Image: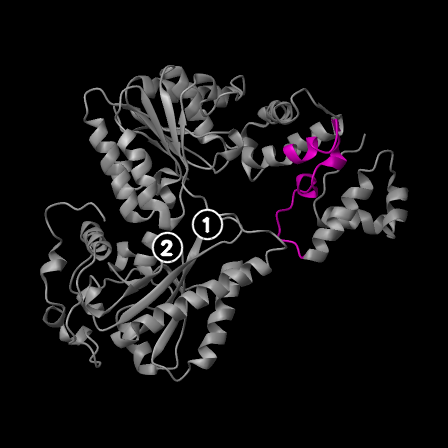
């Protein structure tokens, strides 16, 4: 159940059948059916809509710009799936839509011109934003906010101008990263088709995800996290233990800034790119400010486990000498973000509260962290704006964590540290490998570096350029076809073979030297030559 205040939103006391302006209301069979009981989920969405200032009478259009040609894997696969579905449903009074993660409609298909005209009148059209923040409670807005399928029938909409429609929407996650890509939304006139709509939307979203996976160059989907909570009693085992402290001045300055804020009792938001070491930085700062605290680290759960996840760690918030880490709060459903803010705010008012946020291994960091003395805990997110509003209001200090490409002097120190952790002893890196590592711009930050080094040191006792993946030797981040990726790998293999000359590499690959030089330029390869 969603925790609620005593007061109800104004929408809960209005009659959907008589409260909407008649000009904005479509006159379709079923518009006068009796209202269904209001669920906690719907009530929470109405309350958020009211807090956002969404008008009750009609949707005020927010135009994000005409959608340009989409080249994302999500759009390509989703459009193909919906186009195929549309062929079988062309005569049905339904509209099939694809939206991005912000609720902006990317495309719309329907054979019912009267429905399209009505949807245009309420601005449910390509280029318009229809998230909860812009349009109030609706199918696609609720699905994106909660990150689970949603069916919003006529009178369940927040805006009365939408009460003649029923919408079913399902969020679509990238199968390899778990990142929210957008949603599949199906809208119709009749509320009687609700269950069928949701089943169609779920089928389309599932097919889109499967198609994305099949076309993602053999990558495998990330297992859904279960939201584990770790209890850490011994100081030497806390998140951030065994990490490097003697790094670049930029890193040390950020750690010191966070430590000072934590010691002063302020909530700290460490913001930066995913994988840059935000949680590790907070862990180091936290240990400096509170050396005797125990630490709880709560990993992001699967959507269906959010309620159980909250029940595991929130009772610990506010206890003496306890620091809490709640990871990836920007990925939480809206109601859960509100609950985290409520828990943190309540603990911040306790006289002896002491709670913070951090995360475990440097290789597992992809978030923003909030920590504080007298605050209820610490949280992680991608950027400050992504932190739920209820939590964001509690933040006292923001610390920017520099990306790894902005502190290249840390690369070799981190690589040697990771190698030592994996192998239990020092591992040598050749000059060619060192040059390749420091020259790469590391778009995946420390998380990518850790993965690359782990893979390399499990194959050799002396890491050379040939033990590094081809993307480390390439300056291009262009998406490659399978044939291009294979060709790049073969060129790198031939050029990094010990003692190989350009002539020998050309003979090995069956190419002329001029072709190899052209391919090196094409793939922007930086192969160290000693």
Q: Is residue 456 magenta?
A: yes
Near mark 1 (Cα within 10 A), the count class, few <14, some 14-19 or many ≥20, is few
Check residue 42 in the rendering and tell me which mark sits there, or answer none.
none
Rendered location of residue 71, percent (x, y): 53, 60
Residue for badge 1: 179
State the image quarter where residue 375 is shown: top left
Task: Decide: is 306 above or below 291.
Answer: below
Rendered location of residue 349, percent (x, y): 19, 27
Identify the image quadrant of the C terminus. top right
Near mark 2 (Cα within 10 A), the count class, few <14, some 14-19 or many ≥20, is some
The image's colouring method is one colour
Residue sitting at x 40%, y 55%:
101
Q: What residue span does the magenta drawing correspond to?
A: 454-481
Q: Is residue 3 magenta?
A: no
Which residue is nearer to you in this view: 206 or 368?
206
Alpha-carbon distance for marks 2 and 1?
A: 13 Å
Q: Earlier in the sequence, mark 2 or mark 1?
A: 2
Residue for badge 2: 102
Which of label 2 and label 1 is nearer to you? Answer: 1
Q: Decide if residue 92 is in sight here.
A: yes
- Are discs 2 and 1 less than 8 Å apart at CB? no
340 relative position to 104: left or right: left
Which residue is nearer to you in this view: 160 or 59?
160
Task: Decide: is 327 above or below 18.
Answer: above
Residue sitting at x 35%, y 82%:
112
């Amino acid at each position: 159940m969603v925790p609620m205040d005593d007061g109800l939103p104004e929408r809960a006391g209005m009659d959907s059948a008589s409260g909407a302006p008649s000009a904005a209301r479509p006159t379709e069979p079923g518009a006068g059916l009796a209202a269904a009981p209001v669920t906690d989920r719907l009530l929470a969405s109405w309350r958020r809509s009211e807090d956002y200032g969404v008008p009750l009478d009609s949707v005020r259009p927010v135009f994000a710009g005409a959608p340009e040609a989409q080249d994302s894997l999500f759009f390509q696969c989703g459009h193909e799936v919906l186009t195929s579905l549309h062929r079988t449903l062309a005569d049905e009074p339904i509209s099939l839509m694809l939206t991005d993660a912000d609720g902006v409609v990317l495309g719309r298909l329907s054979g019912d011109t009267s429905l399209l005209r009505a949807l245009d009148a309420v601005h449910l059209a390509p280029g318009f934003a229809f998230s909860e923040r812009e349009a109030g409670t609706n199918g696609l807005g609720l699905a994106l906010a909660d990150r689970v399928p949603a069916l919003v029938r006529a009178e369940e909409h927040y805006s009365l101008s939408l009460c003649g429609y029923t919408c079913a929407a399902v969020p679509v996650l990238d199968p390899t990263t778990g990142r929210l890509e957008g949603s599949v939304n199906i809208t119709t006139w009749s509320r009687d088709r609700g269950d069928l709509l949701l089943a169609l939307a779920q089928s389309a979203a599932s097919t889109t995800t499967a198609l994305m996976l099949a076309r993602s160059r053999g990558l495998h989907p990330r297992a859904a996290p279960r939201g584990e909570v770790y209890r850490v009693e011994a100081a030497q085992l806390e998140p951030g233990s065994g990490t490097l402290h003697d790094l670049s001045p930029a890193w040390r300055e950020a750690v010191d800034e966070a430590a000072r804020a934590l010691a002063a009792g302020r909530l700290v938001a460490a913001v930066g790119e995913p994988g840059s070491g935000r949680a590790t930085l907070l862990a180091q700062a936290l240990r400096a400010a509170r050396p005797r605290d125990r630490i709880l680290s709560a990993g992001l759960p699967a959507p269906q486990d959010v309620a159980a996840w909250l029940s595991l760690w929130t009772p610990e918030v506010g206890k003496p000498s306890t620091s809490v880490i709640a990871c990836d709060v920007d990925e939480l459903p809206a109601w859960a973000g509100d609950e985290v803010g409520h828990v943190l705010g309540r603990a911040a008012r306790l006289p002896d509260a002491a709670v913070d946020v951090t995360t475990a291994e440097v290789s597992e960091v992809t978030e923003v962290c909030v920590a504080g003395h007298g605050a209820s805990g610490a949280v992680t997110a991608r950027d400050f704006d992504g932190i739920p509003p209820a939590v964001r209001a509690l933040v006292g200090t923001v610390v920017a964590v520099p990306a790894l490409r902005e502190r290249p002097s840390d690369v070799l120190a981190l690589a040697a540290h990771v190698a030592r952790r994996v192998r239990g002893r020092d591992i040598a890196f050749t000059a060619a490998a060192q040059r390749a590592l420091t020259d790469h711009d590391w778009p995946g930050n420390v998380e990518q570096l850790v993965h690359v080094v782990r893979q390399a040191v499990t194959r050799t006792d002396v890491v050379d350029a040939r033990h590094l993946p081809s993307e480390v030797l390439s300056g291009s981040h262009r998406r490659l076809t399978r044939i291009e990726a294979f060709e790049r790998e073969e060129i790198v293999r031939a050029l990094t073979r010990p003692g190989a000359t350009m002539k020998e590499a050309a003979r090995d690959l069956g190419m002329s030297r001029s072709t190899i030089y052209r391919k090196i330029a094409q793939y922007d390869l930086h192969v160290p030559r000693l």
